[in-house]
Image (cartoon, helix red, strand yellow):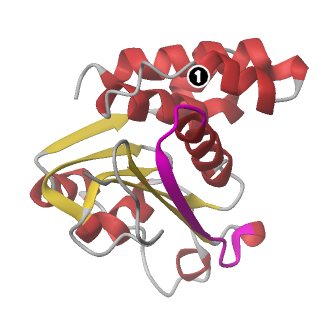
Amino acid sequence: MTKNILLVGVGGQGTITASKLLTLGLLESCYDVKMNEIHGMSQRGGAVSSDVRYNETGAVDSPVISRGDADIVVSFEEMEALRWCDYVKPDGAIIVSTEHIAGLPVMTGRVEYPEGIVDELKKAAKTVLVIDGPAEAKKVGNSRVTNVILLGAIVKYMNLENIDWHKIIRENVKPAFVDLNIEALELGKTLGQKL
């Protein structure tokens, strides 16, 4: 059976890096995997999304996740979680970082950053895990590893702990940041136990 993971965020948060690490780990473990990414105006703080679909025993026919088909939606920014929550299955999960990054409509004053986002997410999915990404990242000493913390939560929720994620990190992260990212991954797996 094909599993669907949708990762969303804002440019510069490491959404694509997390999805690539996830895809590489799945490929290394002989899953059939398809990945699709949309950058939009990501280098200017615009929306970023990445679909990761995988199957252990069969073929994945398309890299695109349809509305209502995601087993899990993982958002690196709160408002992006709200924008994409209709992609999650009713019995699926949403993992959301509490980080707020004002997009262009908010910065120009056309719209206000919405309140009560987590309450809305709880209406869309059976399970919602809220993670204070920046605060958790500070625990491992670098604010830029929120993406790997959320990857660790995905690994736990999707029962992918049989994959050698430490090897994937060692092979795909700059040597100076390997230990930091491994620590972030393990922290995320611990947080993922709450799902």
Instruction: Estimate the x, y position of residue 24 in percent, counting from the top left.
Output: 63, 40
Residue 127 horizontal side relative to residue 48, left or right: left
- For the point 27% across and 75% down, the residue is 67
Location of residue 139 by image quarter = top right
Foreground residue, 174 or 56?
56
Residue 151, above or below 94: above
On whether residue 35 falls in the magenta region, the answer is yes
Foreground residue, 40 or 68?
68
On whether residue 94 falls in the magenta region, the answer is no
Foreground residue, 184 or 120?
184
Instruction: Estimate the x, y position of residue 11 in percent, counting from the top left.
Output: 68, 61
Instruction: Estimate the x, y position of residue 144 in percent, counting from the top left.
Output: 70, 35
> Magenta region: which residues?
28-42
The kind of residue tagged 1 is Trp
Residue 96 horizontal side relative to residue 86, left or right: right
Residue 54, above or below 47: above
Residue 52, above or below 127: below
For label 1, the residue is: 165
| Quadrant assignment for the C terminus | top left
Could you say whether the residue bearing mark 1 is in a helix, strand or loop? helix
- Count residues near mark 1 (Cα–Cα under 10 Å), then give few for <14, some for 14-19, many for 20+: many
